[in-house]
Image (spheres, rainbow, N blue to C red):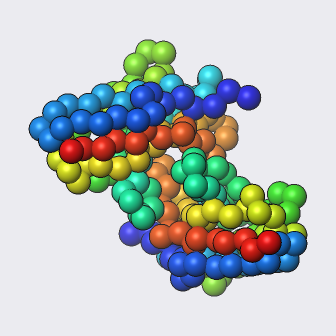
Amino acid sequence: AAGVIQSPRHLIKEKRETATLKCYPIPRHDTVYWYQQGPGQDPQFLISFYEKMQSDKGSIPDRFSAQQFSDYHSELNMSSLELGDSALYFCASRGLPQETQYFGPGTRLLVL
Amino acid sequence: AQTVTQSQPEMSVQEAETVTLSCTYDTSESDYYLFWYKQPPSRQMILVIRQEAYKQQNATENRFSVNFQKAAKSFSLKISDSQLGDAAMYFCAYRPTQGGSEKLVFGKGTKLTVNP
């Protein structure tokens, strides 16, 4: 079965640079969620989209923005990167009537 | 705010034996979903099992089952016939069904070691 696709899988950036993470949900899933997992931490919710509209917002820094496109893929844009942004970024998708969020493999971001 | 507590940072079990991971949560909602996710060393988040709060019957998926005690706000995971591949970090997660927010709230996780 098709799964959530995230790209890139690994990303190395310098401080103050920008990064764009992409997420391709499972086909026919219309809701996308972004989570951030720091080293040794549990995943923390950042933001979600339903039918291309932002549906919920968590502890996402103002330096980050995201959107969902007409084909339902989503992009997380991160600017002015800081060392503390180094983490594993997950995208998850959900399609009604299912209640389960299915996670992608994650993007490992390292900020130097 | 809803919170999820996993009181066991680490657990270990012998291969082929049974282990139970604990999870408690705090919510004022009457309807919600509870999940157990497994995160192996690859760090992929894999759904293990799901429970709807309105269902009294405990969910079961092969060797994995839950003990859901709604009044006590407890949601433990039992792994039977443990296998080496079960070694992973296990996260308990909560999600309300109403109120607009669909975010998952995770516990801090329990690291499970399976000894041969």
Against B13, residue A61 (above or below) is above
Residue shown at the point (48%, 40%) measured from the top left: A106
Q: Find residue B108 and report its horizontal and vertical position in percent.
A: 48, 70
Direction from residue A66 to residue B3 in the image, left or right: right
Residue at 29% x, 49% y: name it. A86
Q: Residue furthest top?
A: A70
Judging depth in this view, the residue of A9 and A76 nearest the camera is A9
Q: Quadrant of the N terminus of chain B?
A: bottom left
Q: Is residue A108 above or below residue B95?
A: above
Residue A59 lies left or right of residue B54; in this view the side is: left
Is residue B80 visible from the viewing direction of this image?
no
**Residue B7 seen from this side:** yes
Q: Horizontal and vertical percent for residue A39?
A: 38, 59
User: Residue at point 77% right, 63% down?
Assistant: B84
Front position in the image: B11 or B48: B11
Quarter of the image holding residue A26? top right
Q: From the top left corner, tell me how far across and down residue B23 is, in percent.
A: 60, 76
> Where in the figure is residue A65, as x and y percent of width and height?
25, 34
Residue B67 figure quarter: bottom right
Residue B78 or B4: which is nearer the viewer? B78
Q: Nearer the viewer, residue B69 or A76?
A: A76
